[in-house]
């Protein structure tokens, strides 16, 4: 999967919500924000929401009926951990003690934009008062 190409295709077609899109994947967890199985998403940030637009497993087409968004004022803190040498996990925590784990690839030829856009999204969240946790 060429993440850069996928994002560019949807960006030029005007189908993306928000700004700073990046390809991520989510896994089922007990955080009560995303409870489905493992799936790829395009994550982007808007004025009041963090958008997750679902991609189909094989064709990487958008599946609008499986999209969701997290209201930015709900987000209280975040934590980044290295999962393995090429995967990082960004965990966002809400005031209600819910969380979402966002996995993304790093250090490959097509992930520079993802890494840059996630850094920008975190900067925007910090400007809104979201704190980084050191666990």
Image (cartoon, helix red, strand yellow):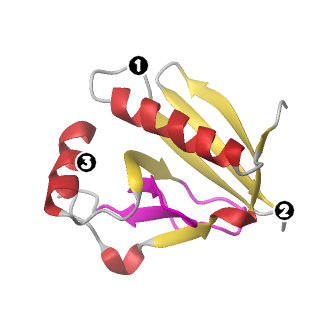
Mark 1 vs mark 3: which is more N-terminal?
Answer: 3
Looking at the image, do the residues carrying marks 3 and 2 touch, with CB atoms under 8 Å apart?
no
Residue 97 in the image: state x and y as whole percent: 84, 62
Magenta residue span: 27-55
Q: Identify the residue shown where x is 70% and y is 42%.
A: 126
Q: Which residue is mark 3?
A: 7
Residue 66 vertical placement versus 23 (above, below): below
Which numbered mark, 3 or 2, is in the foreground of this view? Answer: 3
Looking at the image, do the residues carrying marks 1 and 3 touch, with CB atoms under 8 Å apart?
no
Taking 4 as reference, is 122 left or right? right
Q: Which residue is mark 1?
A: 107
Residue 1 in the image: state x and y as whole percent: 23, 40
Q: Which residue is mark 2?
A: 97
Examine the image and state in which quarter residue 73 appears.
bottom right
The label on residue 115 is: none
Compute the Cα span from label 3 to label 2: 31 Å
Answer few, some or many: residues within 10 Å of disc 2's Cα (few below 14, many 20 plus, some between 14 and 19). Answer: few
Compute the Cα span from label 1 to label 3: 18 Å
Query: Which is more toward the observer, 78 or 123?
Result: 123
Answer few, some or many: residues within 10 Å of disc 1's Cα (few below 14, many 20 plus, some between 14 and 19). Answer: few
In magenta segment, residue 29: yes
Q: Quadrant of the C terminus?
A: top right
Answer few, some or many: residues within 10 Å of disc 3's Cα (few below 14, many 20 plus, some between 14 and 19). Answer: many
Q: Identify the residue shown where x is 32% and y is 76%.
A: 64
Tag 3's secondary structure?
A: helix
Taking 83 as reference, is 67 left or right? left
Residue 37 vertical placement versus 65 (above, below): above
Residue 128 vertical placement versus 62 (above, below): above
Mark 2 vs mark 1: which is more N-terminal?
Answer: 2
Q: Does residue 40 appear in the picture of this structure?
A: no
Compute the Cα span from label 2 to label 1: 31 Å
Which numbered mark, 1 or 3, is in the foreground of this view? Answer: 3
């Amino acid at each position: 999967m060429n993440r850069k190409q996928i994002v560019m295709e949807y960006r030029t077609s005007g189908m993306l919500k928000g700004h700073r899109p990046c390809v991520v994947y989510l896994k089922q967890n007990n955080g009560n924000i995303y409870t489905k199985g493992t799936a790829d998403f395009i994550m982007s940030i808007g004025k009041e929401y963090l958008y997750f637009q679902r991609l189909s497993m094989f064709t990487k087409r958008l599946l609008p009926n499986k999209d969701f968004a997290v209201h930015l004022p709900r987000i209280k803190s975040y934590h980044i951990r290295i999962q393995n040498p090429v995967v990082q996990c960004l965990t966002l925590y809400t005031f209600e003690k819910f969380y979402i784990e966002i996995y993304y690839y790093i250090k490959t030829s097509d992930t520079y934009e993802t890494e840059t856009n996630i850094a920008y999204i975190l900067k925007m969240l910090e400007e809104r008062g979201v704190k980084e946790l050191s666990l």
